[in-house]
Image: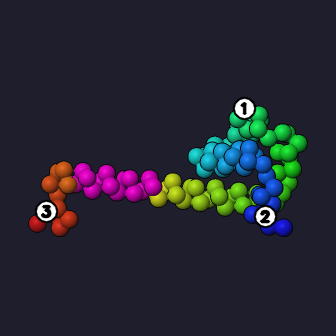
Amino acid sequence: MTAKKRSFFLSVTERRTIDYIVRELALGRELFDILDDPYVRNRIPEKRMYALHEDAELLEAFMAEIEAVRATMVAAETAAIVAAEEEKMRSEGVSDHGAL
């Protein structure tokens, strides 16, 4: 059974909690700190959390999600920096051709 099919068997609460964990990991937080968050502890029973940890396919799917979120965040940050630099250049009167 693939991780995608397995994730079908997660409750809505578990899926949302896992999404939260993935987002927090993508922001650079440590897994153990996230798992200690009241939001996580109150939504996924400790026994179920251990079962999720042991599911290698599911963990691989989480890691893929984390990488996708990180890539999106980096792309958005890069686009914002480029846009800010372009705006700064326009406001200073610098053209695309430089000062010749």
Q: Are marks 2 and 1 in contact (CB under 8 Å)?
A: no
Which quadrant of the figure has residue 66? Answer: bottom right
- On the image, numbered disc 2 is attached to which residue? 5
Relative side of 65 to 55, left or right: left
Which quadrant of the figure has residue 79? Answer: bottom left
* Camera-side mark, 3 or 1: 1
Q: Amino acid at mark 3?
A: Ala
Relative side of 71 to 53, left or right: left
* First along the sequence among labels 3 and 1: 1
Q: Circle 1: is it few (<14), some (14-19), or many (20+) Cα within 10 Å?
A: few
Q: State the image coordinates of residue 98 (x, y, percent, origin top left).
A: 17, 64
Q: Is residue 94 above or below residue 21?
A: below
Q: Amino acid at mark 1?
A: Pro
Q: State the image coordinates of residue 5 (x, y, percent, origin top left).
A: 78, 64
Q: Which residues are magenta?
A: 76-89
Q: Amino acid at mark 2?
A: Lys
- On the image, numbered disc 3 is attached to which residue? 99
Q: State the image coordinates of residue 76 (x, y, percent, origin top left).
A: 45, 55
* Camera-side mark, 2 or 3: 2
Q: Circle 2: is it few (<14), some (14-19), or many (20+) Cα within 10 Å?
A: few
Q: Are marks 2 and 3 in contact (CB under 8 Å)?
A: no
Per the model, the C-alpha gap separating discs 3 and 1 is 57 Å
* First along the sequence among labels 2 and 1: 2
Name the element at disc 3.
loop
The residue under the point 75% across, 63% down is: 4
Q: Circle 3: is it few (<14), some (14-19), or many (20+) Cα within 10 Å?
A: few
- On the image, numbered disc 1 is attached to which residue? 38
- Farthest residue to the left: give it: 100
Instruction: Please tell me the numbered disc located at residue 25.
Output: none
> In what quadrant of the picture does the C terminus appear?
bottom left
Front residue of this view, candidates 10 and 38? 10
Residue 25 visible (yes or no): no
